[in-house]
Amino acid sequence: MDPMRQKKINRYKGGISTIIVFVLFSFVNVFLIAFMDKYYLFSSYLSALIILILTELSQSYVWIAMVITLILLVPYIICAIFAKKHYGFMIAAAVFLSLDTLLLGGDMILSLDYGVDGGLIINLLFHIAAVVELIMAIVSKDAVKFMKEAKISAINAPDSVKTEVLPDGETVSVLQDTVTDDGDTDDSIQTRRLTITRKKTFYASMVKFDVIIDGVLVGTLKNGQSLTVMASSRAHALYVQLQNGNSDVLQIPAQAMDKTYELKPIAKPNEAYIQITELS
């Protein structure tokens, strides 16, 4: 896939992830505030206010407050589910979150006479960052179309990758690219090993890397794992992506020599960058 398209998809998926995290924290907060008098940041401020107000009036209202606050999270859940279908749901989520941010900011201004609440400031910053993330997702609204096209392409794609176990017991991915345009096998093309190793790092350690060669997903790497791909001696294009980041496209030259590459994630503002280094 075109790296620019993939970047838009990653940015849009990042917006969906932001909505999901916001909903999860808000859901947990319903029970924390009601029963443990604790509060997570980056969650629905409106929900928190309703619980606090009703429980202060009477502890018997706690279940009513919980039901109301859970109902208020339903629009966010709907937006997270259907945002992949149409970017309008991403816009709706941005509006909901912006209103919640304005409520939080307004309450913070009104309470300045009683001193500055550090928790409210941090929560406001989290809200603003989330709104920015959703706005960036809306700017990348073409990602919805790109994701649909990628899904159709995956369904119609030929079986160009298969897994084989070599005599020594090693499991490898075999890229079927030794066929000429007329359908015959080109005997002049040799087979070589492309070894891709993901360096073990703390950053992005829980995120899987998708390894793509010539537009085909050849494998997925967890932290510290390696992947061996049997490919032809033709030139190839290596590309790596994750949910919120990607690498540049690396051109592997046409030659019969085996190649080894190392992947390393590098943190960048709003996304991760995957550095590909040729080791041999």
Image (cartoon, grey):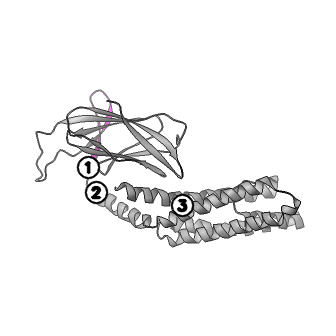
Report the residue marked by disc 3.
16
In the image, residue 24 lies at what x, y percent?
64, 57
Cα–Cα gap, marks 3 and 2? 27 Å
Quadrant where the image shows the C terminus: top left
Compare residues 263 and 79 and report the one nearer the observer. 263
Cα–Cα gap, marks 1 and 2? 8 Å
Could you say which quadrant of the image residue 164 lies in?
A: top left
Residue 157's mark? 2
Report the residue marked by disc 1.
160
Compare residues 188 and 276 and report the one nearer the observer. 276
In the image, residue 42 lies at what x, y percent?
68, 57
- Using residue 100 as the reference point, say whether residue 223 is left or right of it: left
Q: Amino acid at mark 3?
A: Ile
Disc 2 packing (10 Å; few <14; some 14–19; many ≥20): few
Instruction: Determine whether label 1 and label 2 are within 8 Å by CB.
Output: yes
Residue 95's mark? none
Give the mark, 3 or 2, whose residue is nearer the N terminus: 3
In the image, residue 81 lies at what x, y percent?
53, 65
- Give the magenta-colored segment's residue range: 161-172
Disc 1 packing (10 Å; few <14; some 14–19; many ≥20): few
- Looking at the rendered structure, the secondary structure element under dot 3 is helix
Quadrant where the image shows the N terminus: bottom left
Disc 3 packing (10 Å; few <14; some 14–19; many ≥20): many
The residue drawn where x is 32% and y is 60% is 153
- Using residue 188 as the reference point, say whether residue 31 is left or right of it: right
Q: Is residue 111 visible?
A: yes
